[in-house]
Image (cartoon, rainbow, N blue to C red):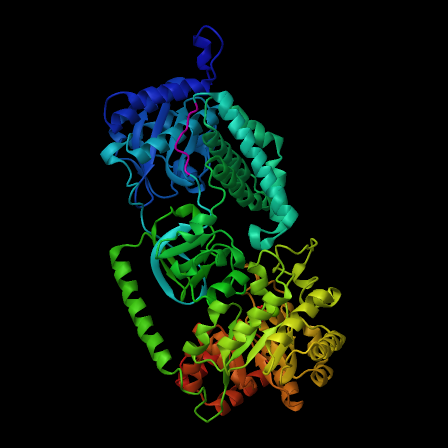
């Protein structure tokens, strides 16, 4: 590129400053938006010694329309359109990254448009016009001679693109013919349903992107120190998160934080941002430009490692932007939600969700979450419609966009057309009617057509869940996840607080039974205030009863609180992740000691204490008889049991749903548990997500389960299924299917049975 300073006397002025100054002048000159675009392309062509400079802007259908050109035929303006993804220009827009081609015409993606007269130009550089991560168009330069454009050229064009983006939003360029920025096209994505329900509302970004509005800084020295201070704060912030190592607070895993730290201390990254400020950009604009350029470089690497790191870079740049804009602490925003908020996050921990005023959250979308993740479980408990596994959604949305979330199918519709809104409003009315039918079943006992009574219990974890016990008509609480209260506390709850919390739950349950699960922490459930060591495989690591037995102080305190809270009632407590029977012996010993202590300290004792084990680890399947002599009941944690049986991480979207719970090996394992429990005359419940789905619940009844526990919203649908089922018939069908020795999934056969027998699935 010819440096503009070559034509000036005195100290050289950086090329970028010259361009910025010129662009600012153009914006200030009289004339309409089209005239400004025409001037911009003329200027850039001149400054970059390019024969062609063109601007394409995105239309509602995703096509790119030629809006201004210097060098191509003027008659092509507003008539040439590239379809979404077409040609090198379309490719640049789709990938949101520069395309630098010395010999564009021989590139397989090149799309020749005779009306433009571009056949004589060989080299091409295209950069996206981005605003807040969304592509608004593409700016292109072309030259006759084959050449690769330099990094400087890319920077100049990217800076121009930033100015164009900013002025497009304000309407200062393109004017009335401009792309419909205020009304971007509607868009739909298919994800995975996490929690049922349908919601219409407006998007609230969990960690909103900051849109940089001030691109230029008058005083680079002050701006530089603002940048430096913000980078320092960013580093402190990351160190802080790492020190606390809190998944719940940071919403990110330790490795991610470590990657952040690596980036934040990367000298190249910092130097490039400082250089951009020295050239006249504001600190925010510098962060954005370097972000875009680094992103593009990383996208060019065909290495999955770097692609994975892209997200870290995006997050880190966003974080830095928020610091610069004074918006890092969004705690206040969390409470000031609109009435119809649709929360959208790349990733989110359960505690972060609970920070929001959940009465205003109509739906939740978490790009990375799978159905078994804890944020999904919390969303379900709160009755919030949720969808997961929609990667890239945050890039296609702006804060405040209208959206529809379909927690039944997993679809997300952005900026929906009025017809779709009307159709969904109908669907919502239909669901409300169905809910009221379920409500009408509230007091009907859950018994099959042939008179087999099934206990339908509810999963809970917070006081906010308790009203559902009554309105769902559940027979009791089959799983109370005590760790949720620990996860949202800022310090380890003391004895009095724990006692009061359990007492409150028991009071709210009235005569209905409650099964408390002892702390299930570790793995992906970390407590912000408890030190955790980095583990290669946290799900297989130091968690649940393992941690409790190694730190008996924690378990002892919790057991003491359970006992005190249950004075005069029955206490049911179960232990998670039991791997071998000796763990039960040790836990029972501790419980016995606490019972003795309770009497000695003059507290009212529970009328009885039942101790159960969760069956979640495959090893215990092969020692069930011994286990059953030591416990009063069993509860199958199918979420964990299946992840270990299939060796498929329940939190990894790529594998979480890969293996069907309705497959022969999984069902045989479950049958083994029921049969052993029946032989030993001990009650058994299943409390994983399986129980919540009518088809799966039907299969469980076929295996012999007579007690299942699920999120309250599922009680109605599962009860409907039970009322239309013949238990003896499903048992016979299951028997046949499991004996057939075909292996694999039997889902379709079960579905066919349900249909043939008119079972409401
Ligand atoms: C399970 O593993 O199935 C279970 C109920 O426990 P959690 O989902 O809390 O691990
Ligand atoms: Mg579990």
Q: Which residues are magenta?
A: 211-217
Q: Is residue 212 magenta?
A: yes
Is residue 71 something that shows in the picture? no
Q: Nearer the viewer, residue 332 or 662?
A: 332
- Please identify the dominant SS of the magenta region: loop
In the picture, which quadrant includes the C terminus? bottom left
Q: Quadrant of residue 118?
A: top left
Q: Residue furthest bottom?
A: 450
Q: Position of residue 517 (x, y in %)?
A: 61, 72
Q: Is residue 11 left or right of residue 648?
A: left
Q: Nearer the viewer, residue 526 or 212?
A: 526
Q: Residue furthest front?
A: 602
Q: Quadrant of residue 611?
A: bottom right
Q: Residue furthest top?
A: 9
Is residue 625 something that shows in the picture? yes
Q: Position of residue 84 (x, y in %)?
A: 36, 44
Q: Position of residue 448 (x, y in %)?
A: 45, 89
Above or below, 223 against 92 in this view is: above
Q: Position of residue 719 (x, y in %)?
A: 43, 82
Q: Nearer the viewer, residue 244 or 647?
A: 244
Q: Is residue 595 magenta?
A: no
């Amino acid at each position: 590129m010819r440096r503009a300073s070559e034509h000036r006397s005195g100290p050289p002025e950086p090329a970028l400053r010259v361009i910025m100054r010129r662009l600012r002048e153009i914006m200030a000159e009289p004339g309409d938006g089209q005239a400004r675009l025409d001037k911009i392309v003329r200027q850039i062509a001149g400054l970059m010694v390019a024969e062609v400079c063109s601007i394409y802007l995105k239309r509602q259908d995703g096509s790119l329309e030629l809006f201004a050109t210097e060098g191509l035929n003027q008659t092509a303006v507003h008539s040439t359109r590239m379809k979404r993804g077409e040609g090198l220009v379309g490719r640049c827009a789709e990938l949101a990254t520069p395309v630098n081609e010395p010999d564009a015409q021989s590139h397989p993606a090149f799309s020749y448009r005779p009306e433009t007269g571009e056949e004589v130009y060989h080299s091409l550089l295209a950069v996206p016009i981005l605003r807040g991560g969304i592509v608004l168009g593409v700016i292109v330069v072309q030259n006759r001679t084959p050449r690769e454009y330099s990094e400087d050229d890319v920077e100049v064009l990217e800076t121009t693109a930033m100015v164009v983006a900013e002025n497009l939003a304000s309407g200062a360029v393109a004017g009335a013919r401009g792309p419909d920025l205020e009304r971007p096209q509607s868009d739909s994505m298919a994800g995975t349903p996490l929690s049922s329900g349908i919601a219409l509302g407006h998007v609230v970004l969990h960690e909103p992107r900051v849109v940089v509005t001030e691109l230029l800084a008058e005083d680079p020295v002050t701006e530089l120190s603002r940048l430096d201070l913000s980078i320092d704060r960013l580093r402190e912030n990351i160190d802080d998160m790492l020190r606390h190592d809190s998944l719940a607070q940071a919403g990110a895993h330790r490795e991610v934080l470590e990657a952040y730290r690596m980036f934040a201390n990367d000298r190249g990254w910092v130097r490039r941002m400082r250089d951009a400020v020295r050239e006249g950009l504001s600190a925010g604009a510098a962060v954005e430009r370097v972000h875009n350029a680094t992103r593009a470089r990383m996208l060019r690497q065909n290495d999955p490692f770097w692609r994975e790191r892209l997200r870290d870079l995006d997050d880190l740049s966003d974080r830095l932007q928020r610091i610069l804009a004074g918006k890092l602490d969004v705690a206040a925003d969390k409470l000031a939600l609109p009435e119809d908020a649709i929360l959208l996050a790349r990733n989110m921990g359960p505690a972060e969700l609970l920070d929001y005023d959940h009465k205003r959250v109509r739906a939740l979308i978490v790009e990375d979450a799978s159905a078994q993740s804890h944020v999904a479980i919390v969303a379900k408990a709160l009755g919030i419609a949720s969808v997961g596994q929609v990667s890239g959604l945050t890039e296609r949305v702006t804060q405040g966009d209208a959206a529809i979330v379909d927690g039944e199918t997993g679809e997300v519709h952005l900026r929906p057309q009025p017809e779709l809104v009307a159709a969904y409003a109908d669907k919502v009315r239909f669901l409300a009617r169905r809910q009221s039918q379920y409500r009408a079943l509230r007091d009907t006992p859950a018994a099959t057509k042939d008179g087999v009574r099934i206990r339908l219990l509810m999963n809970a974890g917070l006081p906010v869940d308790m009203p559902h016990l009554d309105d769902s008509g559940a027979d009791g609480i089959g799983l109370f996840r005590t760790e949720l209260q620990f996860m949202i506390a800022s310090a380890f709850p003391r004895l009095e607080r724990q006692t009061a919390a359990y007492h409150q739950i028991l009071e709210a349950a009235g005569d209905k039974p409650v099964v408390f699960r002892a702390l299930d922490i570790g793995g992906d459930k970390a407590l912000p205030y408890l030190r955790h060591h980095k583990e290669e495989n946290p799900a297989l690591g130091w968690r649940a009863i393992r941690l409790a037995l190694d730190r008996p102080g924690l378990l002892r305190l919790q057991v003491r609180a359970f006992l005190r809270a249950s004075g005069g009632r029955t206490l049911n407590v179960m232990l998670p992740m039991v791997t071998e029977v000796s763990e039960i012996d040790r836990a029972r010993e501790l419980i016995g000691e606490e019972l003795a202590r309770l009497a000695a300290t003059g507290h009212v004792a529970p009328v009885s204490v039942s101790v159960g084990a969760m069956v979640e680890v495959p090893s215990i399947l092969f020692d069930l008889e011994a286990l059953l002599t030591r416990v009063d009941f069993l509860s199958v944690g199918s979420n964990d049991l299946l992840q270990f049986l299939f060796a498929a991480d329940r939190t990894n979207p790529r594998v979480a749903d890969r293996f069907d719970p309705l497959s022969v090996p999984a069902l045989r394992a479950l049958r083994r548990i029921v049969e052993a429990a029946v032989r030993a005359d001990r009650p058994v419940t299943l409390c994983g997500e399986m129980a919540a789905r009518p088809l799966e619940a039907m299969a469980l009844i076929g295996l012999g389960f007579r007690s299942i526990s699920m999120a309250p919203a599922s009680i109605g649908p599962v009860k409907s299924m039970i009322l239309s089922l013949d238990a003896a018939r499903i048992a016979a069908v299951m028997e046949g299917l499991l004996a057939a020795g075909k292996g694999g999934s039997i889902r379709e056969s079960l579905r066919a049975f349900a249909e043939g027998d008119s079972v409401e699935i």
